[in-house]
C-alpha cells in the first residue's frame, strides 16, 4: 500500500490538462491507434487516445480489440516506447562543408529537441527512461538526449489490467508508477485519481478542478494495483539470476533457442532500454559535403560484433546469449540495474514467440535440477 496523497479529477479535466500543456509550448505525446497497434504519437486532444480499445498480447501475437467500456487507457504497451523521442532511430550528428580549396566548415547540426509532455506512460516505460539515463545522461551526456530529457513532462498511468506478456512485478518496475513522473493517474469509471510526483506536477494539478480522494476510493486504487500485480501474464525468477546466467554460458539451451531465432532484431528494436547504435559517414558526389548519421543498431546483426580480424559473435546462439545475458546479468555490473523492465515487448513482437522469461527460467530451472541431483547423489554417497 502506498501512503501518498491522492487527488481526484473528473475525466474531462484530462483534455484541459492537454490544452494547458499545448499552451505552455509542449508537444503532447500520448498513446493512439495507428496501423493496427497502439503507439505514442503527438496528440491534440483526448479524442486521439485509444478510447474503448484494448490489446491482446501473447508470444508473437498482438491484436487490438474493442472493449465494452470507454476507458481511455484500457490497454498496455504497444510496439514502441517513448525511447524514440529521446534517442531518435535516425539522427544527423553533424555535417562538414568544403568552402574553397582546403577550407572546411563544421556544422554541428543536432536539432533542438521539442519540449515533450508524455501522457499515459506506463510504470515500465518510466523505469526504462531511468535505465536509459544511465547510458545517455549520467556519465557522458548525449546533448540531444540530455536536453529532451530535462525539459520533458511525464504523466504516468497505473496499469489495472496487465497484458499477456507483462512481467513488471518480477522486475519491480510496476504496475504502479512509483518514480519518474510529474503526475500519475489511475483511471476509474468517470474520474482519475492523481498522484503528484514533482513541483511541475503540482502546478499542473493546481490548474485543474480537483479534490482530495476519499478513503474508499483510495482503498479501491490499492486493490486495483494489488490485483494487477497478481495477474501478470509472465513472471521471471530474478533470484541469483545474473550469476546463474553468467556461470552457464555453455548451457545447451542457448543452442536450442538459436534453432528458433531468426536474427530479425525485432526484440532489440522494440525494447525500451536497448541503446546500441551504428554511426555512418556519408559524402555526396561532389565531394564538397559530408555528414555523420547515427542509427539504431542491434546486437542481433552479424556486423555488430565485427572487430579487426572477424566477427566475435558469429552464431545466432552467441548473439542471443549476448542479448539476454546483457539485459539480465552484465547490465547490473555495467549500470547497477537490470537492463529489463518487464514490458514484454520483445516477447509479443518476436515473430516466433521467443520468450525472455521462459528462456531464462529454463536455464535457471535446469541448473537447479542439476544441483539438486548432485546434492542427492552426494547425500547417498555419504549415507552408503
Ligand atoms: S528485454 Fe524485453 S521485456 Fe525486458 S525491457 Fe526489453 S523488451 Fe521489455
Ligand atoms: S529473439 Fe525473436 S525477435 Fe529477437 S532476433 Fe530472434 S526471432 Fe527476432
Image (cartoon, rainbow, N blue to C red):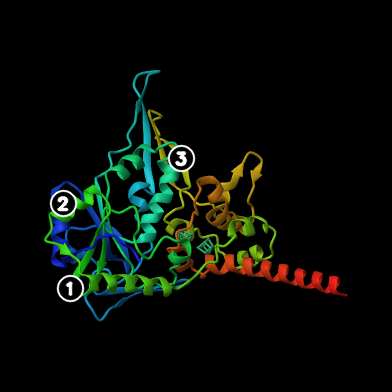
Disc on res. 243: none
Which image quadrant is residue 91 in?
Answer: top left
Q: Earlier in the sequence, mark 3 or mark 2?
A: 2
Q: CA distance from mark 1 to mark 3?
A: 51 Å
Q: Is residue 162 in sight in this rendering?
A: no
Q: CA distance from mark 1 to mark 2?
A: 24 Å
- Label 3 lies in ligand 2 vicinity (Cβ under 8 Å): no
Residue 24 at x, y = what percent?
15, 47
Q: Is residue 93 in sight in this rendering?
A: yes
- Which corner quadrant holds the N terminus? bottom left
Label 2, secondary structure: give it. Answer: helix
Q: Badge 1: few (under 14), some or many (20 or more) residues near its Cα, within 10 Å? A: few
Residue 122 at x, y = what percent?
34, 61
Disc on res. 22: 2
Is 311 drawn above or below residue 254 in the view shown?
Answer: above
Disc on res. 280: 3
| Residue pointed to by mark 1 | 190
CB-based contact (under 8 Å), mark 1 and mark 3: no
Residue at image point 29% right, 38% down: 111
* Label 1 vs label 3, nearer the camera: 1
* Label 3 vs label 2, nearer the camera: 2
Query: Does 190 sit left or right of 270 as displayed?
Result: left
Query: Does 218 sit left or right of 322 as displayed?
Result: left
Residue 78 at x, y = what percent?
36, 65
Q: Earlier in the sequence, mark 1 or mark 3?
A: 1
Q: Nearer the viewer, residue 79 or 11?
A: 11
Residue 84 at x, y = what percent?
36, 51
Q: CA distance from mark 3 to mark 2?
A: 36 Å
Label 3, secondary structure: give it. Answer: strand
Q: Earlier in the sequence, mark 1 or mark 2?
A: 2
Amino acid at each position: 500500500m502506498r501512503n501518498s496523497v491522492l487527488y481526484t479529477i473528473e475525466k474531462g479535466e484530462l483534455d484541459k490538462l492537454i490544452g494547458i500543456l499545448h499552451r505552455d509550448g509542449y508537444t503532447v505525446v500520448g498513446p493512439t491507434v495507428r496501423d493496427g497497434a497502439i503507439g505514442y504519437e503527438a496528440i491534440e486532444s483526448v479524442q486521439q487516445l485509444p478510447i474503448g480499445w484494448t490489446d491482446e498480447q501473447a508470444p508473437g501475437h498482438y491484436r487490438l480489440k474493442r472493449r465494452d467500456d470507454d476507458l481511455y487507457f484500457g490497454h498496455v504497451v504497444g510496439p514502441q516506447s517513448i525511447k524514440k523521442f529521446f534517442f531518435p532511430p535516425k539522427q544527423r550528428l553533424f555535417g562538414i562543408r568544403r568552402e574553397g580549396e582546403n577550407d572546411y566548415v563544421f556544422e554541428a547540426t543536432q536539432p533542438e529537441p521539442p519540449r515533450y509532455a508524455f501522457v499515459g506512460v506506463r510504470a515500465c516505460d518510466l523505469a526504462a527512461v531511468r535505465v536509459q539515463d544511465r547510458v545517455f545522461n549520467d556519465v557522458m551526456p548525449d546533448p540531444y538526449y540530455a536536453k529532451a530529457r530535462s525539459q520533458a513532462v511525464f504523466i504516468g498511468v497505473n496499469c489495472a489490467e496487465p497484458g499477456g506478456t507483462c512481467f513488471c512485478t518480477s522486475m519491480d518496475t510496476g504496475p504502479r508508477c512509483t518514480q519518474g513522473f510529474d503526475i500519475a493517474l489511475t483511471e476509474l469509471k468517470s474520474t482519475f485519481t492523481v498522484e503528484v510526483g514533482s513541483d511541475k506536477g503540482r502546478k499542473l494539478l493546481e490548474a485543474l478542478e480537483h479534490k482530495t480522494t476519499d478513503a474508499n476510493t483510495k482503498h479501491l486504487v490499492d486493490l486495483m494495483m494489488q490485483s494487477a500485480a497478481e495477474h501478470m501474464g509472465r513472471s521471471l525468477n530474478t533470484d541469483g539470476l545474473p550469476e546463474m546466467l553468467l556461470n552457464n554460458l555453455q548451457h545447451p539451451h542457448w543452442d536450442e533457442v538459436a534453432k528458433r531465432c531468426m536474427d530479425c532484431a525485432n526484440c532489440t528494436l522494440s525494447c525500451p532500454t536497448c541503446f546500441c547504435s551504428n554511426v555512418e559517414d556519408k559524402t555526396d558526389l561532389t565531394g564538397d559535403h559530408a555528414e555523420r548519421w547515427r542509427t539504431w543498431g542491434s546486437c542481433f546483426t552479424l556486423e555488430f560484433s565485427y572487430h579487426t580480424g572477424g566477427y566475435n559473435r558469429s552464431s545466432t546462439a552467441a548473439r542471443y546469449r549476448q542479448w539476454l545475458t546483457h539485459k539480465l546479468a552484465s547490465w547490473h555490473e555495467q549500470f547497477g540495474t537490470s537492463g529489463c523492465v518487464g514490458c514484454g515487448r520483445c516477447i509479443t513482437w518476436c515473430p516466433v514467440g521467443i520468450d525472455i522469461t521462459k528462456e531464462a527460467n529454463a536455464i535457471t530451472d535446469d541448473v537447479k535440477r542439476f544441483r539438486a541431483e548432485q546434492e542427492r547423489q552426494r547425500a547417498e554417497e555419504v549415507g552408503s
